[in-house]
Image (spheres, rainbow, N blue to C red):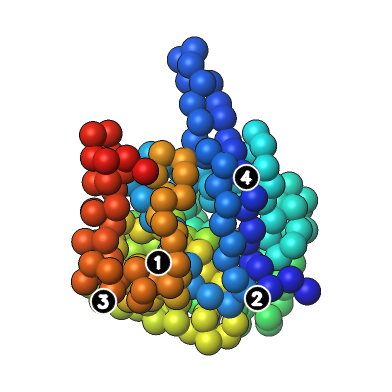
Amino acid sequence: MTDSAIKMSGLRVRFRDRGREVEALAGVDLEVRAGEVFGFIGPNGAGKTTAMMVLLGFVEPSAGSATVFGEDVRRRIARERIGYLAERAEAYPFLTGRELLDTAGRLFGLRGAALRERVDGLLERLGLAGAADRRIATYSRGMLQRAGLAQALVNDPDLLILDEPTGGMDPLGRVEVRGIIADLRRRGKTVFFSSHELSEIELVCDRIAIISRGAILSGGETRALVARAASLEKYFLELLGADSPGGGGR
């Protein structure tokens, strides 16, 4: 049994865009321990979503390796223990919230009373019980995000990957998501998420890594990094300023 939920070693991703080669990930080394909440942050275009796509098996690495609980991410078994919420949750608009979760649960082999219990519990936990039988086409952006998070949790994953999980949510929704993440930590689950809401990262993450231009600039215990600059936002801006062209480089 491995103590690592995620491990990336020399991970590189290159692709061609308009005739030129782009390096989205430039030799990333990163380890996320099982049972921790890990924040993965950086500016737009830094490589965060590309790294997540590698973990999910959607993007093939150009070099290096990535594993989930010791299994190569290219193997199906590695993805069976993952739940994923994209930056913009999308679903078939003609489905109801209940039908969305029911369908997702069936894909993971849930049936009968176990499926009904799981779906009802998630609808209640995510504040969607009152809208469970409405079509998703009528949902607000925040409600759609809640439905996407419920779908990501339907298989009770050991690793939850979240890309901007509180996008479109009001302050109450953000608090509820923090509560869900805290509950997952108590249950020994691993949460790996990216967000531009650095205050959210600072509140809930055990450790973080900061990526820019496809490379890890800094990482470590959240409290230790925050202590260097009074807040994560200040530390992030100082670090990115040093990494920008003409900013001293690193």
Report the residue marked by disc 3.
172
**Circle 3 — which element?**
helix
**Circle 1 — which element?**
helix
Across and down, in percent, residue 77 comes to 77, 58
Query: How much space separates mark 4 and mark 2, taking CA atoms?
Result: 40 Å
Report the residue marked by disc 1.
146
Q: Residue at x 39, y 81 (%)?
A: 179
Query: How much space separates mark 2 and mark 3, taking CA atoms?
Result: 28 Å
Q: Nearer the viewer, mark 3 or mark 4?
A: 4
Report the residue marked by disc 4.
10
Q: Residue at x 60, y 71 (%)?
A: 33
Q: Residue at x 71, y 77 (%)?
A: 112
What label sits on residue 72 in the rendered view?
A: none
Query: How much space separates mark 3 and mark 4, taking CA atoms?
Result: 40 Å
Q: Nearer the viewer, mark 4 or mark 2?
A: 4
Query: How much space separates mark 4 and mark 1, taking CA atoms?
Result: 35 Å
Name which quarter of the figure residue 238 lies in.
bottom left
Q: Residue at x 52, y 81 (%)?
A: 185
Query: How much space separates mark 1 and mark 3, taking CA atoms?
Result: 12 Å
Q: Nearer the viewer, mark 4 or mark 1?
A: 4
Across and down, in percent, residue 137 comes to 37, 53
In the rendered structure, are the residues bearing label 2 and label 1 in contact, judged by CB atoms less than 8 Å apart?
no
Instruction: Give the camera-side residue of 101 and 159.
Output: 159
* Position of residue 65 in the picture relative to residue 91 (left or right): right
Crowding around mark 4 (Cα neighbors within 10 Å: few <14, some 14 to 19, many 20+) is: some
Vertical side of 93 occupied by 157: above or below: below
In the rendered structure, are the residues bearing label 4 and label 1 in contact, judged by CB atoms less than 8 Å apart?
no
Report the residue marked by disc 2.
115
Vertical side of 14 occupied by 164: above or below: below
Query: Which callout, 3 or 4, points at the residue further toward the start of the chain?
Result: 4
